[in-house]
Image (spheres, rainbow, N blue to C red):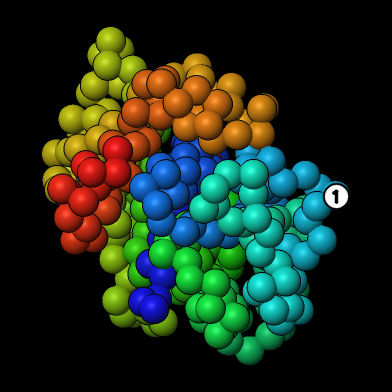
């Protein structure tokens, strides 16, 4: 059994589409037959809510995983969606930065947790970590645990602002803890191609970042924004929506980059 590929979904800005991308990329990858774990490390717990795991069902959370050394198999819960599992989050994670402060190897807690043998036995193909909107110790834990960082960029003014700081954090983590950390890619989210500004931001991103930017662009789509209030990925809420199509395309683009055979993927779609 091969190790799961661990991808941290990060951007220190809030509201850029991290959680939406974590949930829907997970759903699109799971739809292709892969077994996927979403690790919610945002105290807001939006990925947990968006995947239909209510507060009352979050007995153990990522906090326990990080601080209490709870077995990962006890923290992971199934979701209502085939192939998608969750390490939920609750507001207790808000104090994690302080609580982690005193421990040794405090940047490596998630790394260790995700390499427990009982997790390996669960046979996940992909693990997506939904990060909080900061470059806090929680996000650093995600970058140390991950093989790559996927950055959602909202197609609006100031999108690129803050990106150099994010890339600096990636470089620091590479130098200090995780030399193999890669940039999975930057994905433009909430794009409106009829809007000149949205187009300009996308052009700027491609000029600055070149091939790091995924060809797939996620459009602004009302079905995507409605889905979380129904506690579903948009792929389950409205499978035929433009948002669902975009996340399927993003999944394919990413998987092809990982060496999955395109014919194999086409056979499954
Ligand atoms: P983050 O996790 O980075 O804070 P979210 O994924 O929660 O961002 O997205 C912020 C808001 O934008 C949410 O209300 C979400 O439903 C909405 N949203 C995200 N992506 C889209 C999209 N492609 N189309 C429409 N609304 C979107
Ligand atoms: Mg979020």
Answer with the quarter of the image where residue 258 lies. bottom left
Viewer can see residue 38: no
Q: Is mark 1 within 8 Å of ligand 2?
A: no
Task: Farthest residue to the bottom: give it.
Answer: 104
In terms of secondary structure, where does tag 1 sit? Answer: helix
Q: Is residue 120 above or below residue 19?
A: below
Q: Residue 231's x, y, as percent? A: 66, 34
Circle 1 packing at 10 Å, graded few (<14), some (14-19), many (20+), is: few
Depth check: 112 or 14 in front?
Answer: 112
Q: Which residue is mark 1?
A: 56
Can you say which quadrant of the picture contains the C terminus? Answer: top left
| Percent of width and height locating residue 139 | 53, 62
Q: Is residue 90 above or below residue 175?
A: above
Residue at the far right: name it: 56
Which residue is most to the front?
Answer: 267
| Closer to us: 110 or 197 | 110
Q: Whole-percent x and y of residue 83? A: 51, 53
205 displayed left or right of 210: right
160 or 179: nearer the viewer: 179
Q: Is residue 97 left or right of residue 174?
A: right
Q: Is residue 182 left or right of residue 115?
A: left
Q: Residue at x 42, y 20 (%)?
A: 241
Q: Please tell me which residue is depicted at 41% across the width and 21% down the height of the picture.
A: 240
Quadrant of the image for the N terminus? bottom left
């Amino acid at each position: 059994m091969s190790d799961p590929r661990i991808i941290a979904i990060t951007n220190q800005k809030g509201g850029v589409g991290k959680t939406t991308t974590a949930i829907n990329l997970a759903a699109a990858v799971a739809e292709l037959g892969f077994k996927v774990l979403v690790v919610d490390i945002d105290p807001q717990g939006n990925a947990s809510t968006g995947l239909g795991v209510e507060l009352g069902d979050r007995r153990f959370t990522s906090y326990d995983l990080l601080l209490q050394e709870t077995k990962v198999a006890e923290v992971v819960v199934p979701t209502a969606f085939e192939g998608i599992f969750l390490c939920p989050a609750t507001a207790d994670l808000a104090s994690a930065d302080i609580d982690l402060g005193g421990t040794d190897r405090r940047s490596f807690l998630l790394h260790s947790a995700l390499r427990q043998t009982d997790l390996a036995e669960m046979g996940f193909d992909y693990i997506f970590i939904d990060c909080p909107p900061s470059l806090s110790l929680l996000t650093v834990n995600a970058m140390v645990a991950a093989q790559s960082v996927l950055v959602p960029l909202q197609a609006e003014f100031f999108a690129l602002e803050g990106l150099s700081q994010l890339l600096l954090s990636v470089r620091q983590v590479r130098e200090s803890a995780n030399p193999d950390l890669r940039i999975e890619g930057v994905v433009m989210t909430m794009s409106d191609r009829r809007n000149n500004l949205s187009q300009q931001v996308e052009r700027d991103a491609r000029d600055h970042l070149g091939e790091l930017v995924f060809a797939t662009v996620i459009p602004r789509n009302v079905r995507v924004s409605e889905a979380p209030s129904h506690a579903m990925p948009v792929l389950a809420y409205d499978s035929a929506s433009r948002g669902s199509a975009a996340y399927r395309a993003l999944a394919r683009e990413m998987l092809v980059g990982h060496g999955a055979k395109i014919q194999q993927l086409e056979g499954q779609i």
